[in-house]
Image: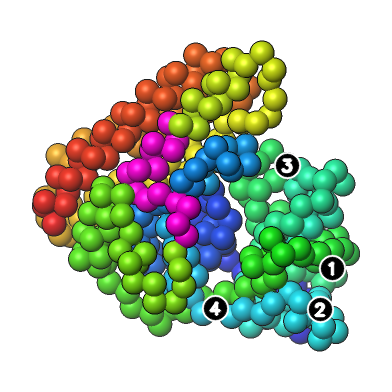
Amino acid sequence: MNSKKKLPVSEPLTSTWLYDAYPLSILAANGNKYLEWFLSNFIQLNANKDITIAERHNVFLKFDGAVTNHAAYLNKQLISWTTFMNLGINIHDYIRGHIDQDYYIQFQVDEYYIPSSWRYGKQHNIHDIFIYGYDNEKKLYNTLGYNRQIIFEESTCSYEQFEAGFKNNYLDKKENFWADRIYFYQYNDSDNYKFNIKLVKNSLIEYLSGINSFETLNRFYEQDPGVVYGIDVFDKILEHILLVKANENSQIKGREAVLDNRIFRFLKEHKKIMMMRIKYIHEHITDAKELLMEYKEAEILAEKAHNLAIKYSISQNTNLLDMLYDYMEQLKDIDQTVLKKLILKI
């Protein structure tokens, strides 16, 4: 066994949700070969249908489906945390052994024990951690995730700190379906996924129609009836902004509706990825120069909206919410107009 080893990682094209960011950080570190698969996917979105009953009126805007669970160019393995704990295996030998075989590992741990987390020593919370290297002399793991300033970056934690967080991953029934899992990823260069224009066209049609064809198939499980799809997510974002504004204007201000900056970070990523997709289509499929120029406005607006959301979190100036609302209406309109033209071209 080596005394140290560090596998390559690179900044992923989307990092709002760590379950997407971790596999994509592996792919990004191994060149651009994966991009044809990536740009064929990551189009459809979903969000909570009834945000009035969600905690803090959370929209939970995300890519539809477990896309990265089926990523091309990755070998994947899974073991449950409960099973692992019952085996009595030394966790550090287990991690080092898998990294020596070029496996990256994603765990669920109690962030109370993880020094890079803002919850360190303050609050117990089960969340993701990603290990891609170790130094056995210093007893440190190389990790990837959000730091105390909520910046996605590389960090380290000690063997002891990680083990405490790992062993304190106590699960309740609500958390068990996602937290009782340990994921292993290994880069596989032998895959050969080509850009799927038919899939892109169908996904764009469903995005603009606010539908999900997989929902009608029910091949493996019932789809969640509590979500909306595609362009309809903008209505939930607009509703979220209005609820936040109403909460700010209330005589009894509480924490019932808090502006979720992740919405606007995610939209910024989604529009950037869409621009990359249109550029690829322009360069490899058909002339889309005008659409590139038109959709650039969406990318700019999404960036402005993200910055505005950050400013609001600092100032609590409700005038910024009005501007944010207007930006979302404009973004929805651009998506409907430009993506409809794109569908007709392909």
Going from N to C along the chain, the mark reached first, 4 or 2, is 4
Q: Which residue is denoted by mark 4 in the rendering?
A: 76
Give the residue type that dot 2 points to: Met
Numbered badge on residue 148: 3
CA gap between label 4 and label 1 equals: 23 Å
Q: Position of residue 273 (x, y in %)?
A: 36, 49
Q: Are marks 1 and 2 in contact (CB under 8 Å)?
A: yes
Give the residue type that dot 4 points to: Lys
Q: Position of residue 3 (x, y in %)?
A: 79, 76
- The nearer-to-camera label among 4 and 2 is 2
Q: Are marks 4 and 2 in contact (CB under 8 Å)?
A: no
**Quarter of the figure that contains the C terminus:** bottom left
CA gap between label 4 and label 2 equals: 20 Å
- Residue 237 located within the stretch drawn in magenta: yes
CA gap between label 1 and label 2 equals: 8 Å
Q: Which SS class for mark 1?
A: helix
Main structural element of the magenta stretch: helix, strand or loop? Answer: helix
Residues 45 and 267: in front is 45
Give the residue type that dot 1 points to: Lys
Q: Is residue 201 above or below residue 3?
A: above
**Quarter of the figure that contains the N terminus:** bottom right
Q: Which residue is denoted by mark 1 in the rendering?
A: 167
Q: Position of residue 63 (x, y in %)?
A: 44, 55
Counting other residues with Cα less than 10 Å from the Cα at mark 3, is it few (<14), some (14-19), or many (20 or more)?
few
Q: Which residue is denoted by mark 2 in the rendering?
A: 85
Magenta residues, start to end: 224-238
